[in-house]
Amino acid sequence: MESLRMIENWPVPHAAAAVVRAADGAVLGAHGPQQHLFPLASVTKLLTSYAALVALEEGVFELDDPAGPPGSTVRHLLAHTSGLGFDEDRVFAEPGNRRLYSNAGFDALARTLSEAAGIEFSRYVAEAVFEPLGMTDTLIHTAHKSPAGAGGLSTVADLTRFAAELQAPKLLDPSTVRQATREVAFPGTSGVLPGYGHRRPNDWGLGFEIRDGKSPHWTGTANSPGTFGHFGQSGTFLWVDPQAGAACVALTDRDFGPWAVEAWPAFSDAVLAELDG
């Protein structure tokens, strides 16, 4: 795909990208060092969320089990509505009232999963997600300040396997993935989308941001409202557009900033235009 060559013009030390087709999980195009190990930052939350969904199906815990601050549940933590602050284990709102994007909430989710399963979180996610998908170079290191929220390292090659799983689940029942990625958790909840300011509403599923009508946005103007995924402060993103029948992964090693706000939507629009062509 020629559109992927646009990453050559990004002002970053290293960049790699790929597009994965929903129908069969085929990689339609790839550019850049596919085996290069990048810090994922908050794209890690997609992997954490998927491990939590596996835990739900295995009966490790339930969505409405208490977790996090008083009154909060596993569902609240996944949907960033627990009331916990961004990086503080401190309550700023009643659970369910505001969409407070929270690394602390995902750390609480990891602790809850680990305690309920009786296994270290990093081991659980490896056994539940990475190993069965063949993501041999991906890890979440617990020595990081925020192992659940931002401690992931991976490659585009590995994340294409994950992107294929998101579009045609084998580890989870498809209805579980649909609930997490297509159904807004706590509809109408407003809050700040990191890097883009306050959004009314700020729609989110269970660990996956749902694009809906947000504008401006880190995905393209041509991405459908049903697009879901996440971006990371380390200059990384993964989106799945069900209408386009494809997913896109892009990893870099330069922090998110004005360069990404400008480059990413144009890149995604070019990818989608090439898919349509």
Image: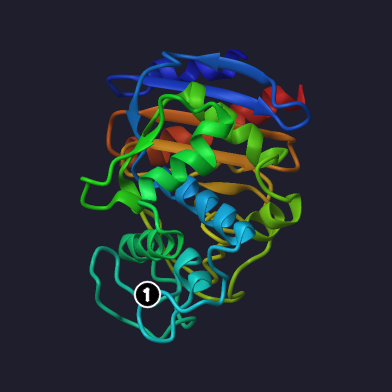
Task: Residue 206 in the image: state x and y as whole percent.
Answer: 56, 61
- On the image, numbered disc 1 is attached to which residue? 68
The three-letter amino acid code for the residue at tag 1 is Gly
At label 1, counting other C-alpha atoms closer than 10 Å, the crowd grade (few under 14, some 14-19, many 20 or more) is many
Q: Residue at x 42, y 25 (%)?
A: 155
The answer to whether residue 101 is above or below residue 241 is below
Q: Quadrant of residue 160?
A: top right
Q: With 90 as the anchor, is 30 left or right in this view?
A: right
Q: How is the image coloured?
A: rainbow
Task: Residue 177 in the image: state x and y as whole percent.
Answer: 67, 52
Q: With 272 as the anchor, is 236 left or right in this view?
A: left
Q: Residue at x 74, y 50 (%)?
A: 174
The answer to whether residue 188 is above or below residue 220 is below
The answer to whether residue 265 is above or below residue 29 is below
Q: Residue 131, can we see it?
A: yes
Task: Residue 6 in the image: state x and y as whole percent.
Answer: 48, 19
Q: Nearer the viewer, residue 267 or 205?
A: 205
Taking the view exactly as shown, the residue that stands out farthest to the front is 118
The answer to whether residue 204 is above or below residue 66 is above
Q: With 87 as the anchor, is 197 left or right in this view?
A: right
Q: Residue at x 47, y 35 (%)?
A: 264
Q: Residue 209, can we see it?
A: no
Q: Quadrant of the N terminus?
A: top right
Q: How many marks?
A: 1
SS at badge 1: loop
Q: Quadrant of residue 191?
A: bottom left
Q: Quadrant of the C terminus?
A: top right
Q: Residue at x 56, y 77 (%)?
A: 64
Q: Quadrant of residue 28?
A: top right
